[in-house]
Image (cartoon, rainbow, N blue to C red):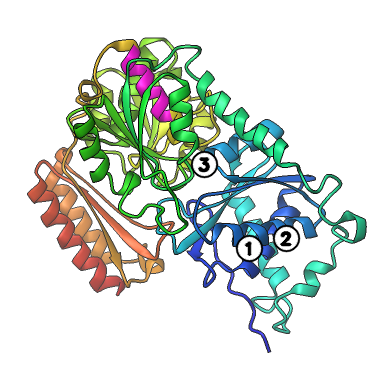
Amino acid sequence: MPQPLHVLRFGTDGVRGVANTELTPEFALSLGRAAARVLGGSAFVVGRDTRRSGPLLSAAFCAGLMSEGVDVIELSVLPTPGVAWVSAHLGVPAAMISASHNPYTDNGIKLFSAGGRKLPDAVEESIESTLADGLGVSGANGDGRNGRDRYGDGPNGRGANVGGPNVGTSRTAATDLVGGYANALVASIQGRSLNGLKVVVDCANGAASVIGPTVLTRLGATVIAIHDDPNGTNINDGCGSTHPSSLQAAVVAAGADAGLAFDGDADRVLAVDHTGALVDGDQLLAMNAIDLRSRGRLTHDTVVVTVMSNLGFKRAMASVGIDVIVTQVGDRYVLDAMSAGGFILGGEQSGHVIFADHATTGDGLLTGIATLDTIMRTGRSLHDHAALVTRYPQVLRSVRGVDRSRLAGAQRLWAEVAIVEAEFGEDGRVNVRPSGTEPVVRVMVEAPTAAQAEAACARLCEVVGHELG
């Protein structure tokens, strides 16, 4: 008798798992059905990155949607923010098949509500509940039949309703939508150009491999593209925002003004200045916050970041009179705080940056364009802009093989955290949290010196392993 399917749970950015092992086509199909029922609407936008499992999982997810009577607009390979842009443009829900910066063996499914916004916790919980009921897990069916008959009980997706009234969206229509996203990126700098800038672009062999160099070239930059030849298995492999060393070398070798490193689905970006130095998300946020404020466009003189932002960023913002609001890790929490306060700029140290007047989610290409535009308008190098933030040495470690669910009650660990924080006072910081995307506990320490940060982080990781192992 077949066993009930394992239900993956939502993390900080959709569901993720090993493709065709944890994240199976059977699960993707069922998630498609559940998403159709919870999110509603007559149409759904679906895009993917360049992983070899992408077509398999996209087809299964789309089949689930169509079996519920929903039209599917397949965009093929496109950055996550491009899928969100189309979702907002059409006013329909969307899904992105991607595991972001993870290796090609993993994949994931990110969902957006109509309008291109990531889902609130309550909506994700509703989808999980619908999944569990439909799949027959936790005793929902009690017969181990994977819930196929329960999903079949719905009123949609029968006979002439299969796939919705406009099933079979033309390739031309999808191409026009992708072109609309590209045009929006070009229009984001209001007719200005990047003429005279030489830029190296690391596409991570991912979703930005075509559209990234194309858009930047349209804006007038001289573009040198690297890692822009995806084969299904080389996404994020020694390249992109998680492995920027080849970009750093390429920028120096080419005598370029700057470099941009995207991740696999291009919703984040890190930069490299002309000296080959890495410019992280905190520095990109700082320079853009200061630029927006100088033009009277930074609403309430405030920027929103997560607990992972460097202490140096916060002190730099304080020195120029910009307020900082801090959220938990995850760009959707940043966006929630931005929406609640009417703020237009926020993001994460990892390079997720949200320009709310142009996008509904983090967009690596948009951030790169805004950063290059700032360089052009100010006449100052990326190196000079990045120097606004003096980064405190930061050490981040992932502790594997531990039970994340016991973290909140680990009294000895939190006592040790308090001791470390007292030792550093205002000159350091500690953050210990369960990862929302991997089965690990992350330990981050900032301190006046790298040696102090390393020692304190090692000390805390040892306690995490002992207490939660």
Instruction: State the extent of the magenta-drawn residues as a range.
Output: 367-376
Question: What is the CA distance from the residue labelled 3 to the residue labelled 1?
Answer: 20 Å
Q: Which of the marked residues, 3 or 1, is nearer the chain's N terminus?
A: 1
User: Helix, strand or loop at disc 3?
Assistant: loop
Residue plotted at (23% across, 73% down) = 466
The crowd level at tag 2 (other Cα within 10 Å; few <14, some 14-19, many 20+) is: many
Q: Is residue 342 left or right of residue 104?
A: right
In this rendering, the answer to whether 413 lies above or below 262 is below
Residue plotted at (61% across, 54% down) = 124
Q: Tell me the kind of residue under disc 3.
A: Pro
- Mark 3 highlights which residue? 79
Q: Quadrant of residue 145?
A: bottom right
- Mark 1 highlights which residue? 28
User: Helix, strand or loop at disc 1?
Assistant: helix
Question: What is the CA distance from the residue labelled 2 to the residue labelled 3?
Answer: 22 Å
Q: Which of the marked residues, 2 or 3, is nearer the chain's N terminus?
A: 2
Q: Is residue 337 left or right of residue 85?
A: left
Q: Tell me the kind of residue under disc 1.
A: Ala
Residue plotted at (48% across, 24% down) = 344
The crowd level at tag 3 (other Cα within 10 Å; few <14, some 14-19, many 20+) is: many
- Mark 2 highlights which residue? 64
Question: What is the CA distance from the residue labelled 2 to the residue labelled 1?
Answer: 8 Å
Residue plotted at (46% across, 62% down) = 106
Proximity of marks 2 and 3: CB atoms separated by less than 8 Å: no
Q: Which of the marked residues, 2 or 1, is nearer the chain's N terminus?
A: 1
Q: Quadrant of residue 402?
A: bottom left
Proximity of marks 2 and 1: CB atoms separated by less than 8 Å: yes
In this rendering, the answer to whether 423 lies above or below 412 is above
Task: Give residue 81's position: percent from left, percent from top.
Answer: 53, 38
Quadrant in which the N terminus appears: bottom right
Proximity of marks 3 and 1: CB atoms separated by less than 8 Å: no
In this rendering, the answer to whether 79 lies above or below 297 is below
